[in-house]
Image (tube, rainbow, N blue to C red):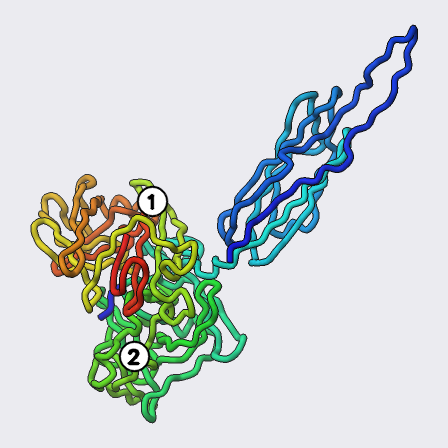
Amino acid sequence: MRSGKILLLFLSLGLLAGCGGGSGSSSGGTGTTPSVPVLSVSPPTLVFGDQNVGTTSVSQIVTITNTGNAALTVTGIASSNMTDFAFTLPAMPFTVAVGVSQTFTVAFKPSSASAISATISITSDGGNASVNVSGTGTAEVNNVMSITVNGSLCSADTSLGYPNKPCVSVTICAPGTSTCQTINDILLDSGSTGLRIFKQALNVPLTQVSSGSGSLAECVQFGDGSSDWGPVEMASVILGNEPAIQVPVQVIDSTFGTLPIACGNADRNPITAGFTGILGIAFFLQDCGSACTGIADNGMYYSCNGPNCVGSSVSLSSQVQNPVALLPQDNNGVIMQLPSIPANGSPSVNGSLLLGIGTQANNTPSVVTTYAADEFGDFLTAFNGVVYSSFIDSGTNGLFFASPSAGLVPNCPDNTDWFCPASTVNLSATNSGASGSPSGMVSFQIGNFDTLTASSNNVFTDIGGESATDFEWGLPFFLGRNVYVGMEGKTSSLGSGLYWAY
């Protein structure tokens, strides 16, 4: 929503003594060859590439071959210390004919950035063998946060009728303590700045930020007409597996003090809002910046003594801040990664938020174009002969723009906020940096909102609605793309923030 050192992993195979033999007796001086099954395991060495903690597992195939001259029976395959390994086996016992191979799969998915090992022992009537597996999870995964769009990180209670909802989890701790709470159903929002958590979802005590003799509170208003009101409190926040940072956050609480007129439409609870909190990852270091440091009547920050709340200026350090920008290393931006989905939508989608741009091996930019934004975070979109101010906003769940014509892209008859063309319409627009360059065309589609959302799917590339004043690239824009957000005053190989890149 819009508001103003790499370790390699090795797997080695050790083959224990494996064949039996005997001497044959003969009659008339003629020798005979005994029937002997022989167990062999190949290849002799398997090497896993670098594997980040918690990422998708990599697998290797182990091949058992009978190199003897009699049928081989494998009676068991057992493992020890398989904490971060798993294997897929055939049913026991099984027979391997002469010269025939049988395979099983070993998968590695490290759960920690530490060295681990395991042994797989294979027993048979043709000798025994063992596969020694080892590996080390790499620590760079600390900068990855999971995203689920209408998936497991989104609460069912708040997501009914809410398509294209990107959710993450955030860990919040009482400052200076190990009293922590991990909260799901946090809306990932590239259109706003700072962390906001509903009071109803918060179970750890935070420290109130003061404003003169009173308590600092905030009213933040969003482009959809909603607003959030509540006190500003200091929290220790953990994003992914990054180090904890101390940051002012907003506790959303419409009962705090006296609700200002500007926040008359304030969200009351997670159910009505559609989320338990918001993680705003827009370009800006603070949600108001210098505009609120010298003017008391700024419309956002207030000083509250009991029920009485009056407008107040506030220092930059006390404002609700972008937690990404405070990270010790991965602080110059984020990369939001979501996969492509079928044309008719998907029930849910899993993706990643990478913290930092070019700060680790997993967030190095590749083949992207950088679009500088202006001081408001906007760039330009040319559509249907008109150039609009525009922005890319994961917290907006559709593509919003002025319809080129009511006949081509009409509003839905029962919900004029959305488009309902008779059939899917193919459209295109050209995005440019705030100065007019570079530029690049973006193709997109708009389908019938009513038809699409009547299905069992929740994630769509082609839903959109009317916006007469700007062009809003919402969540559908992120599907099938890596979208970069460059933080204010910070640099990467893509340039100096503020910028979008994709």
Where residue 497 appears, x then y in whole percent?
Answer: 27, 65
* Image x and y of residue 447, in percent: 22, 44
Look at the picture and state if 151 lies above or below 250.
Answer: above
Q: Amino acid at mark 1?
A: Ser
Tell me the residue at 21%/51% (across/down): 464
User: Which one is in front in this view, the residue at disc 1 or the one at disc 2?
Assistant: 1
Q: Nearer the viewer, residue 402 or 439?
A: 439
Disc 1 crowd rating (10 Å Cα; few below 14, some 14-19, many 20+) is some
Label 1 SS: loop
Q: Of all residues shown, which one is farthest toward the bottom? A: 213
Q: Which residue is mark 1?
A: 340
Which of 83/445 is in front?
Answer: 83
At 22% from the left and 70% from the top, the residue drawn is: 4
Q: Position of residue 246 (x, y in %)?
A: 43, 76
Regarding residue 157, the answer to whether it shows in the image is: no
User: What kind of element bears circle 2?
Assistant: strand
Q: Nearer the viewer, residue 407 or 395?
A: 395
Q: Which mark is residue 175?
A: none
Residue 167 horizontal side relative to residue 193, left or right: right
Number of marks drawn: 2
Q: Is residue 117 left or right of residue 495?
A: right
Query: Residue at label 2?
Result: 218
Crowding at dot 2, Cα within 10 Å, few <14 / some 14-19 / many 20+, comes out as: many
Residue beneath the point at 67% across and 21% down:
99
Residue farthest to the top, as pictured = 28
